[in-house]
Image (tube, rainbow, N blue to C red):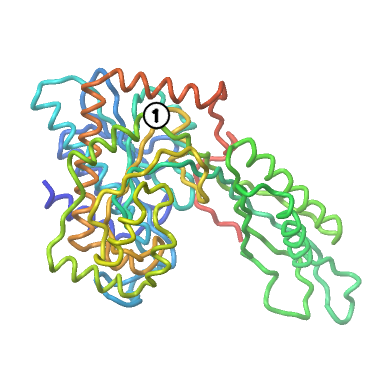
Amino acid sequence: MTEQLDALADEIWGYAETGFLEEKSAHAMIEVLKQNGFTVETGIADMPTAYLAVYGSGSPVISFLCEYDALYSMNQKADADRHDPITSSDDTGHGCGHHLLGTGSIYAAILYKNKLQEQHLSGTIKVFGCPAEESGSGKAYLARSGLMEDTDIALTWHPSNYNQVVTGSSQSCISVFYRFHGVSSHAAGCPELGRSALDACELMNVGVNYLREHMTSLERVHYAYLNAGGKAPNVIPSEAVLKYFIRSDTNPHCMSLYKRVNAIAEGAAMMTGTSVEILFDEGLSNTVTSNTVEQVLAQSFRRLGPGTFTEEELAYAQKYRNTADEKQIIDTLPQFAVNRSQLEEEVHHSPINISFVENTHSDLCEMGSTDVGDISWIVPTGQINTACYSFGAGAHTWQWVAQGKSSIAHKGYQKAGEILADAAFTFHEHPELIAQAKEELRQKLHGEVYKCLIPDEIKPHVSTVE
């Protein structure tokens, strides 16, 4: 079975399709699921590249979450130990390992299915194909659709430099475009007739930068110019566009900060005599952690242990370990690790994580966002990492893309699948743990009901604003 899945992971690595454009990747995964006994519905939640694969019936309902989108500006040859783009292909690459992520979740579902078959047990397995995690918030649309509401437990994982159970919350995030409209004129001959959209952008950014003093330490705002008004200095630009990410620790706080940024945009338009369109792009929710699910995943991790590597594989990892600064690796070790000194010692002597990193459970909000958060508001959700890459290789870098087809990467997704399947079976054997996880989620929500940050009128889309 692993030969089929190794080939699947490598195939998706080669496609490297970005959010909501993952047609070939989704098709390849669906074919493997069908060949392994799952029935598949495509195009769920208004997303053409999303799918739902189902096996079995009855309780419990355990869902596995797949991702398979790639990143722009991540083109790279496999196994090269330097930045070496593939000049004949698109500028995309699997710099976050989602080709492994989707494959590993499918492996988990198949292993769990086989266990149920062997013991003649009932139970429903769902595999959700979730597109556009990097840009698009696919799981937010999935959560909004109501398709997750009959799930008892949701399990997923992410390729990493470490073997660990993921803990800690994440930030809510709103992505939004600000398109300013002004009036063109000759910048020397009749500047008084012009109304600069670029001036409005710059004033908005100045205003937001002053806002930073009045934000909490858990909030972040970042922006990029998508259209800076053209290339001619002697033409007052009539059009200019900014894209913003606005983040906070909870959905209500994020929405409040979004409104403050909108007010600054409107003020910038007033100051410059321009107008502004505020175009909501995407939104995703903070993660609601589950100590119960984390404990079950940790038990499975301890029982099965992390992956092991040959001398050849360690030498391969060392090539990429050599491209990183050791101090930076030490400074960015998992912040909730129980035995940090032991992990530091491992960094000194191994090119890759070979131990299980025990973490202390945390509800603290970490900087960064994931659309897994939307699922976690609806169903108790847990996530693990397995070591698929050398120490020091960062996500969204050429080092991750280059190592993505290696035997180390394959072993990483396989180990993730084994652990997730084992945890799923633990929940199957112990329904009281499912009840405990659901009660924990109820208490953590404090009576709040999930409300997707994306307005109802906005459908899944590829962002094309310029």
Q: Amino acid at mark 1?
A: Pro
The answer to which image quadrant residue 118 occupies is top left
Give x and y (percent) for residue 170. Answer: 50, 44
Secondary element at image label 1: loop
Identify whether 15 is placed above or below 297.
Answer: below
- Write down the residue under mark 1: 380
Left or right? Give the position of 322 relative to 5: right
Left or right? Give the position of 371 relative to 55: right
Q: Residue at x 40, y 52 (%)?
A: 334
Give x and y (percent) for residue 34. Answer: 19, 38
Left or right? Give the position of 139 relative to 424: right
Left or right? Give the position of 447 relative to 301: right
Identify whether 156 is placed above or below 2.
Answer: above
Q: Residue at x 55, y 23 (%)?
A: 446
> Dot 1: few (<14), some (14–19), or many (≥20) neighbours within 10 Å?
many
- Residue 257 visible (yes or no): yes
The answer to which image quadrant residue 455 occupies is top right
- Residue 27 visible (yes or no): no
Give x and y (percent) for residue 275. Answer: 79, 55
* Quadrant location, the C terminus: bottom right
Q: Residue at x 48, y 52 (%)?
A: 135
Give x and y (percent) for residue 53. Answer: 27, 34
Identify whether 398 is placed above or below 22.
Answer: below
